[in-house]
Amino acid sequence: MPTNAASGSWCTINLIDRPTAGTATPCKEYKHETSTDPTTGAIQETATIESQAASPFEISFNIKPTTSSSLRKPAPASSKTRSATNNSPQSLVPEDYLVRFYLDGIDIGDCVLPRTHGFPYTVGGVSVGEGLYQPLQFAAVNLVDPDEHQPSDDDDKICEDEDVIKSLGTIRVNITRCVAVPQSTASFADQPDEIRTTNQMNFSERSKKACLATTAGLAKPTIDHKPAPAIIWEAENAEPKPFLEFIFKYKPQSILESEGIIAPTVPEAAAKAEPENKPKREENKTSKRIKSEDKKQKKSGQHEDKKPNVVDLTGSDSEEHHDKKSKIIDLTGSDESD
C-alpha cells in the first residue's frame, strides 16, 4: 500500500469480494513512487493498482492526528534544534483533518475527522439522502461511436470534459488541515438524489484515454441500513491546499500486461502441456508451472467483517472540478483505535 515514510500514514484500495458479507481484498499494487506537487507543495504517494470491472471497492486509510506535524519542515534558523526535537512525541501536535475523495477527477465527497477519532478508517460509499447511499464501484467504460450515437438527453451525451477525460484511471485522496466542529444532525435537503460519475457517462471510442476499459465511480443508489449518526462533523478554517495526497492509477490486468508492468498470464492448460516431440529421457522430469501471485493479506488494523462507511452530503464548495456542496463521512461505528 502507498505509505508515507516520514509519518507512517497509508492508504489502500480494497476489492469487496462479497458485498453482503463485507469481506474485502487489497488490490495488487505496483510502482510505488513518492513525489512533491510543484504547485501545492503536497507530498504525493502514488501507486499503480489492478482494477476489475464491475467490482465494488472501498478506500481504507490511516492518517494519524500527528501526520501533518511530522511532515512539517523545521525553520532554517533552528534546523539543528528542531531536528533533535521533531522525533519526540512532545513535538508532534495532533490536528483535525478534511479528507476529500476524487474518482476520475470528480469530487464525490469528503469526511471530517477530528483528532480524537480512531484509525484506520474505511469508506465504501456516499450518502445521497436519508436511508440511501451509492457504493464505490469499478465499471466497464461506456464507449460509443460519435458518428452513430444519438443521445436521448443531456446525460446521455458523450463526455467532452477534458478534466474528466485526462483524469480517467485515477483515484485520489487529499488530506487537508482544518478545525472539526460537531453538528447535531445532517441535512439532505439540498443534496441530489444521485451523484453522476464516469460510471454513468459515455465516452468516444476514438479517445485513447477512454479505452482503458474501466472507470471508477459510484453505483446506483441503494438502501442504507446503517442508522444515522448522532453527531456530524463539519470543517471550518480548512486550508486551501492539501499537505498529503494518495494517488492510485488503476488499470485492468490486460493493460498492465501490455505495458510490461506485470508478466503475461499463461493459461494453466498451456503450462501443463508438453511438446509431442519431447525426448523420452525427460518424461519423469517434474514440470514447472507458473505460480500465480497470492492475494495480499489484509494489513494490520483492517478486518474482513468490517462494513464500509458511507459519505453523508452536507454542503461546501469543492476545491476543484465540478463545484458542489461538501459531503461529510458518517463517523458512527467506523473507527478502529490504533
Image: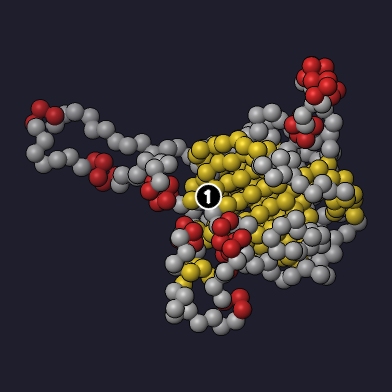
Front in this rendered view, residue 171 or 285: 171
The N terminus - image quarter: top right
Which quadrant would residue 44 be assigned to in this image? top right
Instruction: Give the image's coloring scheme.
Output: secondary structure
Residue indicated by mark 1: 250
Please, is residue 260 above or below residue 129 in the view? Answer: above
Relative to 231, 22 lies left or right: left
Relative to 46, 240 lies left or right: right
Q: Count of labels shown?
A: 1
The C terminus - image quarter: top right
Which quadrant would residue 41 be assigned to in this image? top right
Image location of residue 79, percent across then percent down: 79, 20
Front in this rendered view, residue 271 or 39: 39
Secondary-structure class at tag 1: strand
Relative to 318, 170 lies left or right: left
Front in this rendered view, residue 14 or 205: 205
Relative to 250, 7 lies left or right: right
Identity, as a three-letter code, of the amino acid under mark 1:
Tyr
Residue at horizontal 78 percent and vertical 39 percent from the top: 118
Density class for disc 1 (Cα within 10 Å; few <14, some 14-19, many ≥20) is: many
Residue at horizontal 20 percent and vertical 42 percent from the top: 273
Please, is residue 187 above or below residue 10 in the view? Answer: below
Residue at horizontal 49 percent and vertical 59 percent from the top: 209
Image location of residue 298, percent across then percent down: 58, 38
Please, is residue 74 above or below residue 244 in the view? Answer: above
Image location of residue 201, percent across then percent down: 57, 69
Image location of residue 145, percent across then percent down: 44, 74
Q: Can residue 151 be seen in this view?
A: yes
Residue at the limit of the structure toward the front, as seen here: 77
Q: Can residue 334 be seen in this view?
A: no
Residue at horizontal 69 percent and vertical 28 percent from the top: 6
Front in this rendered view, residue 47 or 195: 47
